[in-house]
Image (tube, rainbow, N blue to C red):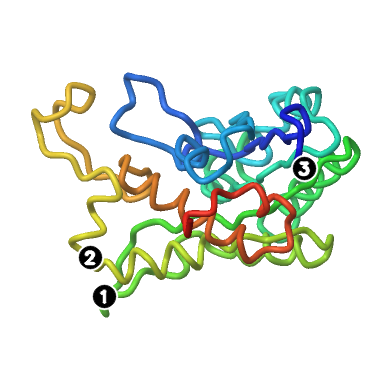
Amino acid sequence: MEKENDYPTVFIAGDSTAAVKEEHEKPMTGWGAYIHKFLQKEVNIRNHAINGRSTKSFIDEGRLNKLSNELKAGDFLLIQFGHNDQKKEDPKRYAAFDKEYKENLTQFVETARKKGASPVLLTSVTRRVFLEEYKIDPNSLGKYPESTRDVADELQVPLLDIHHSSMIRFQSMGEEESKECFLHLDKNIYSNYPDGLIDDTHFSEKGAELVANLVAEQLKESISPLGKYLIDKSK
């Protein structure tokens, strides 16, 4: 049996879809706020995901260096970006899917490995964009999920294809029910959003927990040793 101090720390590097939210942002919630529910209680979570960041801005702001200083051998680094990397109108965040984005993901992977930690790549969670034929648009994140898959294959990194699994899950829920997983807020209900809100990128608490569950489900099937720290809900 493992000693308590032998348990790893799970680090998360990502954007607002994974970040823990401040009180003034709620009920907006990131999936990183729920991942602890699926991991053994001895596993520590260090969520470095932050709103609005791309791989480029996360690195340029020194956030990867800060995270690296905390990493130690045996830890894990979950890496999920793409939503802000695709913003061509913002040179501080834009990273072309076929060049800078891949280079940046490689830097995250190499940073983890240099510290003896294990990187895990996650494709971007889908946006809730339904097409006329009542299917989720597979191209709402452009080619960024594909580029993440390519980097995982090239560098032999465990991959959690959350873009695909979230697309299938929200699509199965349907156009109306899936709204509950995102921020479709009526006026004068939430003090943080008195004018209401329609946001098909960021999650409600229900959506964040659902995505965290998808992450856990894929960890069971991945080659990452992090899977052994999942809670066995069959017992």
Residue beneath the point at 27% across and 80% down: 133
Residue beneath the point at 64% across and 37% down: 13
Mark 2 Cα shell of 10 Å, populated few (<14), some (14-19), many (≥20): some
Residue 175: which disc? 2
Cα separation, mark 2 vs mark 1, equals 7 Å
* Amino acid type at image mark 2: Glu
- Above or below — where is 141 with respect to 171? above
* Amino acid type at image mark 1: Tyr
Looking at the image, can residue 144 be seen? Answer: no
Label 1 sits on residue? 134
SS type, badge 1: loop
Mark 1 Cα shell of 10 Å, populated few (<14), some (14-19), many (≥20): few
In this rendering, position of residue 188 left or right of residue 41: left
Q: Is there CB contact under 8 Å for labels 2 and 1?
A: yes
Residue beneath the point at 44% across and 52% down: 211
Quadrant in which residue 23 is drawn: top left
